[in-house]
Image (cartoon, coloured by chain):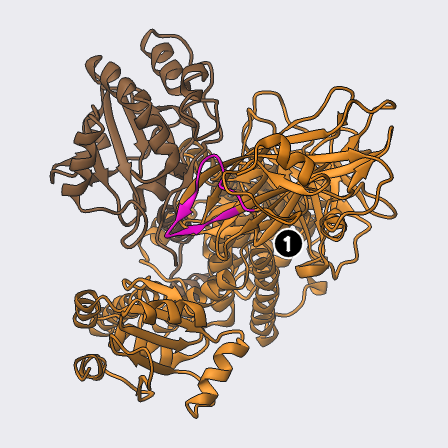
Amino acid sequence: MTSHGPIKQTQKIKNEMIKTLLITCGLIALSAGLSFAETEVGKAAPDFSLSDTNGKTHSLAELKGKYVVLEWYQPDCPFVRKHYRSGNMQGLQKEYTAKGVTWLSIDSSAPGEEGNYPAAKLNEIATQDSASRTALLLDPSGEVGRLYGAKTTPDMYVIDPKGILVYKGAIDNKRSTDLADVKTATNYVKNALDASMSGKSVPTTATQPYGCSVKYASK
Amino acid sequence: MHTDRERKSLFRGLPVRISHCAIALFGFAMACAEPVHAQLYNGKELVTPSLVSDVTAIQPGQKFRVGVLYRIEPSWHIYWRYSGDSGLPTKIAWQVPPGFKVGDLQWPLPLREKEPGDLEVFDYTSEVLLFADIEAPAILPAQPIVIQAKTDWLVCQSLCVPGRAELSLTLAGGANTASSSAPIFQKFASLVPRQPAGPIALGFSRVGKNLVVSVAGVPNTEAVDFFPVPPEDAVIGHVTRGQNGLTIPIDTEVKPIDRMDGVLVVGSGDSRKGYEINGTTTLTAMKPVSAGASVGFLGILQMLGFAMIGGLILNVMPCVLPVISLKIFGFVSEAGMDPKKAFRLSMAFSSGIIGCFAVLAAIVVLLQAAGAQIGWGFQFQDPRFILLISCLVFAFSLNLFGVFELSVSAQATKGLASLAGGQGYGGAFFQGVFATVLATPCTAPFLGTASAFAFAQAGWVTFLVFLFIGLGMALPYLLLAINPGWLRYLPKPGEWMLRLKQGMGFLLVGTLLWLVWILGQMKGVDAVVQLGAILLVIAILAWIKGSFWTPVSTGRSRVLSIVAMAFVLLLSGAAYGFVTKPSQLVWRPFSKSTLDEALAAGKPVFIDFTADWCLTCKTNERFAIDTPSVRQEFLKRDVVALKADWTKGDPEITQILKQYGRAGVPMYLIYPSGLKEGQPVLLPELITSQSVLDALNKT
């Protein structure tokens, strides 16, 4: 600089563009982190950690290297009942957990809402249904449900061993509560798992889920 | 019990449901039936469907209407043909005698409603008629003519119950007269969306992942909405209203979507009108909307022009203007007798400035790409993005007003200064960098805002915009180096620069206003108030920073200011939690009948007369009613908690308030268990958990 005047003047104010940028970036990162990002197929499934009905904690990060199915669950929903009374859901759970898939059902019902039961009651229902899931996770705050943008019960997510979401949406293409539809329906979850596990590309990667709304807490 | 045939002859022309308990009294019929799947919930039939026609008898070739009228229990709903995030469309399968032609099912305009968790559904409440036009053949078949409808529905409140009914209607041939159901057909037919007509025109355009619906011919004062009916294989998000029209986020599409069926809704409340948009609707070519990546060539040119002007304006900022003449004199004296060298030096200096902006652009583009990688979309259709930008713009406007300065260590400044100390072109280049960095106290608010907006643009647009801001900022040096004599036209530095800077702050507040408006359009008044609260916190933080953490502040003052900021954040977090925390008590909405029902069941009842705008009510609810001890007592005594919401001045509630000599809320009534007659306990306006418990125990 040819003169020290302006330098002194500005040094007094002491400022730096990099810092401004850092603040900007920080603010952006902060608020984006606070708000919930909806999951996208082909991207990493967001990590979460929840305890199950037996008090054991499960986190997605620990399940790297395995296929993971997330099933949004609410025992009293007629759509969920359709897939349990027909044996469809248990069948899938049994078949794929035997193939090493981790099957996590998640109950995001808020306290006081339908489907928010004590863990013991949920275990009792699981026994009655002869459910073959890996675990039933409790998400009464709805935090993980919102993180994934889960809308209905059931709402299904298939995550590959790299932690990438390969399918999200409806369990099958027959949007009804009719038990008989299960037999004739195209099961998207089964298709996604079969294709992905045999190294093929998943035929349908995202569909509009159908069912009861997830019983999030009303604001 | 009559046989089916007997009933048909008895009930000719009247609506009859296949039923186990049809009651016939001297030829008068009452539609009393049990659906195939009884759908009782707490002893109530949630949906009562009946098959009706607008005529009593039909003539050959005649067109008439049949429909299923669903009567729905209060607070329950059934779904439209696109149910939204959850639920299931109501279905009707018709069965008509050979020769009869059934038209498409007609759907009256549904409601667009929110459920907890930001879920959205399209539904009907209380009563709806779904109907179809039927055309009779030229020769009527043997009578009686039986029309059957199998209907499936899902009825939901917070929980859902599926229902199904098989209904049948017998019509005779003959001179037709309007049936008693004709007014119902008239009522619901008027609610069925019609073809867009008159000045109303509609166009679709694709902007990245969004399908934008532009609407013309609707007065600005009218609300506009679009209820989509997406293809089966597509997944879409919620329709939002923005400044460019309506936006439908397309999450998944199998075939590219460039238009969508649905209903354009104009107006609000009871005066809503629906316009059917389908494959045959003629679309108007809309001028491309200037949002996000869809900016046309001219739009880009315009943007670059503004960027350059913006860069030029940066020169009159207090920390920039004094430097210009110094620099020019410097170049002239270094170049000596060679005016070309002075120009080349200022070129090198300008490249330093532009280089800085290129780096800034690169950072923005990289961040944007990194964000996109992990699934953050930066776009104006995203309310979170709007929220973030609003916060930034507001913080920067406070900065311009002088509430706080952005200050940091002098080390980096020193480092740059030593680089810029050299002579020659290299030295001039770094002086350009240096000058740009030193100017940031005044330029950061603008560059920060520009960066934030740039996040919503394509990478190359961002890059160009920043280069042009740099060019604009470097322009005076380039021009003045050609003829230093022009320096005399340069305005003299002075206090006016400070005032100008502050004035620019108002410009940013104006920008903020625009952002708030967009957010309000998308998310409503609650979101705007939430944003306001966040801005308030930002203002307080900025004020603490500006007052107690300046370059001359002592270490103690700085520590205290950090503590104060943490305290403010904590306090505002707690306040947010307080305001938005859902009640842990299970409240039921108050009505005279719910009260009578609970009393008849011999249950104790607590009624909370409240309103959203009543602070005392909210405080009482949080600190006196929704407390562990009261919750426990309510549970133990099986108290029915009723909430009488007077937010909108419900007349039934007003009357009860008067009855107890109150002009307003809060008011609390406790009906002890077993009290069928007599007076409930009236609690004072200010209550504690103890006074609630005492009142309960007194009984």
Front residue of B687 and A15: B687
Q: Please indicate whether residue B582 sits to the left or right of residue B312 in the image.
A: left
Q: What stretch is highlighted in magenta?
A: B32-47
Residue B162 in the image, given as x and y percentages of width and height: 45, 38
Visible residue check, residue B436 = no
Of helix, strand and loop, which mostly describes the magenta segment? loop
Q: In this view, does B364 lie to the left or right of A76?
A: right
* Left/right of residue A173 with respect to residue B194 in the rendered view: left
Q: Mark 1 is on which residue type?
A: Gly
Q: Nearer the viewer, residue A27 or B148?
A: B148
Name the subunit of mark 1: B
Residue A9, position as x, y percentages in the image = 43, 66
Identify by letter the chain in orange: B
* Residue in the picture at 30% in, 29% down: A70
Residue at the spot of label 1: B310
Q: The brown chain is which one?
A: A
Q: Which residue is drawn at 34% across and 15% down?
A: A193
B58 displayed left or right of B342: right
